[in-house]
């Protein structure tokens, strides 16, 4: 079956798909979003970064998000044994919002895609992309609904925002190995039952295992008394513990004394999930007739909650480039989309690498930090990885973090 062709076909209704669809629809273009799952649906990655609010506002969705009453977030707290360090986003050097939200992604993502529909995008759920062909004058995309109905679409352009489904990388053989070690995450949602005042619910809590400093936990509180809880380690580390995924998760949680005390009365409210080998890369971010957004292109690691922010930045860059192209301009997608996007991705990559080799941990827990340096680090932790005035962003970020960590180990900072 052939349907009337949209100008733009968006694969996936997560944050990247919703934001790009809304911006293109507001610019007057016919946009069709095809989503494989039925919404609302569970998704991991609930702690947003402050920079994401700029992208949400640019897509005309800030009011819809604010009405949902999500948990206010003003920073991050880190714990390693007896050491504690807090970063308040208000202390950043970059311009932009100093707060954000912690969100059950099922509700958050549903809010965004409903608002994209309000702004003019057409959305169809439970539709899977089965084949693509970019060799002709227009892309040809075949789909199949949950009811078995098959259709062919011939848009002017395709944007893949399919997240971990990675539709176009899979169908076009664009995947390439990540240079990160294979890691695994065990995660769930809990009724946390944390005593009032024992924990700052306006911050994500990142705790480090007392013996294995490359093993870390997240605790992300929501506004409804529940929290997202997870632990990231090598799969070999997880498999040291007997039992089900739930039993393994709680055994590992009980090994971190502070977290064990906080969650002494906690009750699980969701099945424990596991993601293994989630880091992903591609050989290219765009091609004739398509571009890859968010996790469909690059996913690093959950440690700094960068996934949604990268997805939203990719959506904004793609929307800006595609609006120009659809009105007849010649667009250099490498210069307008890939290169600026990768500047921030490489910033986050440097921070993730420095976290696991402990350089960044030594910076975060240094007890005599230089205030201006700390504010620059805070800016990246708040999501402002594209701020070119910050020396800890871009291609030199990794080298500068290592130099800074060496100074911290000697008891000094510049």
Image: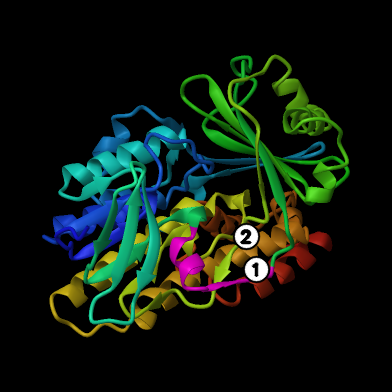
Residue 176 lies in magenta, yes or no?
yes
Q: Position of residue 140 (x, y in %)?
A: 29, 70
Q: Is residue 379 visible?
A: yes
Q: Is 305 situated left or right of 110 in this image?
A: right
Q: Is residue 39 left or right of residue 67?
A: right
300 shown above or below 44: below
Is residue 389 at least partly visible in the picture?
no
- Report the residue at 68% width, 75% height from top: 399
Q: Position of residue 243 (x, y in %)?
A: 82, 30
| Residue segment shown in magenta | 166-179
Mark 1, secondary structure of its residue: loop
76 or 290: which is nearer to us? 290
The 10 Å Cα crowd at callout 1, few under 14, some 14 to 19, many 20 or more, is some
> Do residues under tags 2 and 1 come within 8 Å of each other at their CB atoms?
yes
Few, some or many residues within 10 Å of mark 2 (<14, 14–19, 20+): many
> Along the line of sight, which residue is nearer the eye, 111 or 88?
111
Q: Which residue is mark 1?
A: 178
Name the quadrant of the C terminus: bottom right
Label 2 vs label 1: CA separation? Answer: 6 Å
Q: Secondary structure at mark 2?
A: loop
Which of the marked residues, 2 or 1, is nearer the chain's N terminus? 1
Q: Residue at x 63, y 18 (%)?
A: 194
**Residue tagged 2:** 279
Residue at 54%, 41% in the rendered image = 44
User: Does residue 247 belong to the magenta stretch?
Assistant: no
- Residue 95, by quadrant, is bottom left
Checking the image for residue 387, the label placed there is none
* Quarter-of-image position of residue 407: bottom right
Q: Residue at x 59, y 15 (%)?
A: 196
Q: Residue 248's spot in the image, x, y percent?
A: 79, 33
Q: Position of residue 159 (x, y in %)?
A: 33, 64
Locate residue 191: give its quadrant.
top right
């Amino acid at each position: 079956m052939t349907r009337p062709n949209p100008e733009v076909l968006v694969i996936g209704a997560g944050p990247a798909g919703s934001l790009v669809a809304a911006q293109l629809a507001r610019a007057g273009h016919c946009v069709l979003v095809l989503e494989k799952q039925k919404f609302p649906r569970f998704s991991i990655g609930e702690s947003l970064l402050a920079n994401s609010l700029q992208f949400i506002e640019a897509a005309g969705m800030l009011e819809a998000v604010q009405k949902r009453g999500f948990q206010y977030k003003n920073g991050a707290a880190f714990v390693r044994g007896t050491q504690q360090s807090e970063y308040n986003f208000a202390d950043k050097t970059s311009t932009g919002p100093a707060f954000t939200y912690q969100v059950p992604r099922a509700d958050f993502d549903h809010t965004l895609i409903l608002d994209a529909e309000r702004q003019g995008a057409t959305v169809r759920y439970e539709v899977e992309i089965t084949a693509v062909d970019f060799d002709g004058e227009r892309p040809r995309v075949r789909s199949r609904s949950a009811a078995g109905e098959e259709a062919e679409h011939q848009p002017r352009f395709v944007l893949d925002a399919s997240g971990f489904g990675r539709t176009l990388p899979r169908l076009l053989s664009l995947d390439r190995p990540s240079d990160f070690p294979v890691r695994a995450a065990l995660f769930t949602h809990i009724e946390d039952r944390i005593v009032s005042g024992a924990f700052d619910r306006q911050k994500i809590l990142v705790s480090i295992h007392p013996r294995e400093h490359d093993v870390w936990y997240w605790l992300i509180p929501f506004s409804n008394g529940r929290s997202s809880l997870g632990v990231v380690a090598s799969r070999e580390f997880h498999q040291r513990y007997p039992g089900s995924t739930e039993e393994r998760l709680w055994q590992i949680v009980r090994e971190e004394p502070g977290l064990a005390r906080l969650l002494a009365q906690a009750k699980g409210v969701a099945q424990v999930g596991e993601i293994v080998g989630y880091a992903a890369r591609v050989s290219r971010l765009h091609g004739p007739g398509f571009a890859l957004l968010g996790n469909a292109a690059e996913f690093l690691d959950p440690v700094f909650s960068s996934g949604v922010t990268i997805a939203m930045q990719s959506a904004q860059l793609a929307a800006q480039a595609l609006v120009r192209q659809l009105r007849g301009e010649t667009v250099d997608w490498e210069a307008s989309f890939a290169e600026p996007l990768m500047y921030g991705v490489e910033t986050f990559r440097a921070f993730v690498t420095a976290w696991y080799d402990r350089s960044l941990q030594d910076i975060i827990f240094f007890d005599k930090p230089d205030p201006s340096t700390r504010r620059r680090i805070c800016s990246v932790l708040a999501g402002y990885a594209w701020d070119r005035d910050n020396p800890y962003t871009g291609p030199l970020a990794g080298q500068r973090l290592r130099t800074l960590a060496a100074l911290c180990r000697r008891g000094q900072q510049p």
